[in-house]
Amino acid sequence: MLLIALLLIPVAAAVASFFVRRREAMEVVNVAGFGIVFLAAVALAAQVMAAGTVLLCNGFFYVDALSALVILLTASVALVCSTYSIGYLRDDQQSGALGDDLTSIEQIAHLRMYYSLTPLLVFSMLFMAMANNLGVMWAAMEATTLASIFLVTFYGKVTSIEAAWKYAIIGGVGLSMALFGTLVTYYAGHSLAGSDALSGLNWSVLAQHAAQLDKTSMRLAFVLILLGYGTKAGLAPMHTWKPDAYSEAPVPSAAILSSALLNCALYCLIRFYILTSRCLGPEYPGHLLLLFGLLSMGISVPFILVQQNYRRLLAYHTIDHAGIMTTALGLGGALGSLGLMLHMAFHTIAKSLLFLCAGNVSQHFRTDLFSRIKGSVIGAMPLTGVVFLMAMLAIIGMPPFSLFQSEFLIVRAAFDGGHVLTGVLFVLFGTGVFAGALLHVGGMILGPKGDSPPAGPRPWRDGSLLALAVALVVIGFWIPAPLFELIRGAAKVVSGQ
Amino acid sequence: MTPFLDMQIGDRVITLMAALVLVLQIAMVSQRWIVVHIRIFAAQSFFLAMIAATIAWYNHAPHIYIAAALTLVVKVILVPILFERLVERMEIHEEIEPIVNVPLSVLISGGLTLVGYVVAESFYKPGEPGLGHNMLAVAISLFLIGFFTMINRRKALTQVLALLSLENGLFLAAISLTYGMPLIVELGIFFDVLVAAMVLGILVYRIRETFESMDVSRLRRLRG
């Protein structure tokens, strides 16, 4: 029942937004839809915590603590972004950012595209996290790309079309590799007893019989999967689409892509990591993941240091954090998995908050470049400035914020597991990112008041910002016990202990 | 025994058609006219559907018929019609010079086919009954040549066609390795292919409108 509601409501919201003619109606439909989705996600998480894994519809849907966590995070980001986008898109409509000489009907058509594609994107992400069949999971993942391409081209600028093209083609190639990997996994398991054409790709079946899967095939499958879903997660060297797509998409979409969709791509990687490590032992997939994770962290450092555009800076941050989480998965074990899951939750909050702050700054100053803002943020928009700086400190791992704890756990997992080189590199890259980000963002926010007028009231945007900021501060000191149980449950799914 | 039940004849028919699929893939590498490129893709998909139907016939696996029918509808009819209309509207008919010239491209494709055979060898288990052992090699070759074409061509639409032919390779791999994916997955994949063709078609059109060209090497503003 809950699952059906979770899937049907976004679809209904998409269809309704497509057919209504008034902006207010679309806004109401979206916020109400995502509100219900969020409540259903909380209820689902509670059900999973109380009754364990949920299997429905003949095993078509499979929700364990890991999927419940991903669903909960996706639903929360979607809700916050939908309230934020009310203020954001109204501002765009008034300032003519949607296009210079659009009639009001064309403007509504633009908004309709945004308000109907966003629920479809969220639907695909939720469906992905619930699918038991790994092939269906792939199809839902491909659907997330298709639903978000036209969100990237939203402003119709030359650069946004370029970004969308890169996103579509690199994502398409990556996902075709992931499909190949899924296929090889199916082949590895198709001689199992009890596997038939219907359930042969079901996670619940494969995970039980992982030890009997064909080992040679699983080796090949994991490489293909890592390249495929790694592209979607933006791991280096397949990350090049990311800064473009995130800096061109409307800010609420960029926030969803960089936090919730990243979680989804990692979720797919985690599922296959579990299968492969049960089949071949944790070393083989672990080493590959460490390689890609550290490479992503390393590559993002120079780009963060020389970055001039703050939205691209945030995108490189996401690449860095995709690397951190991949490294944590590669380290594995109870400690690494717990670090991974905590980091996923914390990063989702912090990164979406950062993008929303960047949206406020970008709409007020009409530029994405550090050099044009020069420290006048705190004067013109104090709340955004403070929250932006705080979220930045959080994301680079400053104590007392929550990401410090998860990163500390991951470093500990590295040294405990004897991966000294990994631990050292992790700290080194972390320091590089720390310096770069603080330098740029500090310089942008703190400074003498420029000639920019103070910003007017922006209730929708600042309300969403504050809600996330409070969440970010609070979970740094106190994680609600049920949420922590859920995170621990998810970590247990990953580590298998 | 009638030819319709003799496995050996079935094997030969499938091998012949797989060879045709491969030849068509290499023809795409050397083709300059976009409309011809689209038709070659349609022909390749047609033979793919025939391979699927043949396998379904000899293995009495009815669910592969559905996959064959879907291939026929989506990749032989809908997608080519969509793309030919697009070409008509955009009035761009000829591909500019690819990055690597044609003779060398064909040579590289030959090399990639060889790689395909080497990789497929590791999946080959002697004595295992089955149809068309060459099929997997052809499938991996399609995949690799599709990759190469994507890198080599500069027109947006040609890249989309290369992506779809790469997907054809996956379809062939699926029916040769496991006689197709589970039906629900197959349905999902075809839905995605259809939507992807439409979405990418619109995107190609917008690239043409915005840049007055379909040459994706002009898309180089976003850096760093």
Image (tube, helix red, strand yellow):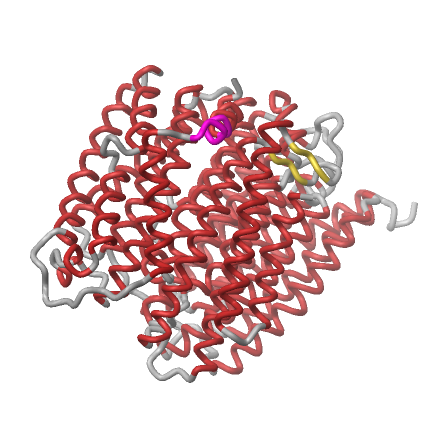
Q: Is residue A161 magenta?
A: no
Taking depth in this image into account, of A495 and B156 the one nearest to the observer is A495
Q: Residue furthest left?
A: A448
Which residue does the image show at 32% across and 67% down from the upper left? A159
The quarter of the image holding the C terminus of chain B is bottom left
| In the rendered image, the vertical position of residue A13 relative to residue B201, given as above or below | above
Residue A246's place in the image compared with A452, above or below, is above
Q: Is residue A250 left or right of residue A281?
A: left
Q: Is residue B83 above or below residue A185?
A: below
Residue A30: x and y, percent? 52, 60
Q: Nearer the viewer, residue A348 or B63?
A: A348
Query: What's the magenta bit mostly, secondary-structure-wise?
Result: helix
Name, please, the residue furthest toward the right.
Answer: B1
- The quadrant of the rendering that contains the N terminus of chain B is top right
Whether A482 is among the magenta residues is yes
- Residue B141 in view in this figure: no
Q: Is residue A170 visible?
A: yes
Residue visible at 28% across and 34% down in the picture = A401
Q: Residue A432: x, y in percent?
A: 18, 37
Considering only vertical position in the picture, is B185 above or below A403? below
Residue A485 percent location from the top left of the image: 49, 26
Instruction: Please name the residue shown 25% across and 49% down the image.
Output: A388
Q: Quadrant of residue B164 in the image?
A: bottom right
Left or right: where A394 falls relative to B123: left
Residue A298 position, x and y percent, is 25, 37
Residue A349's quadrant in the figure? top left
What is the number of callouts on the image? 0
Q: Which region of the structure is painted magenta?
A: A480-486
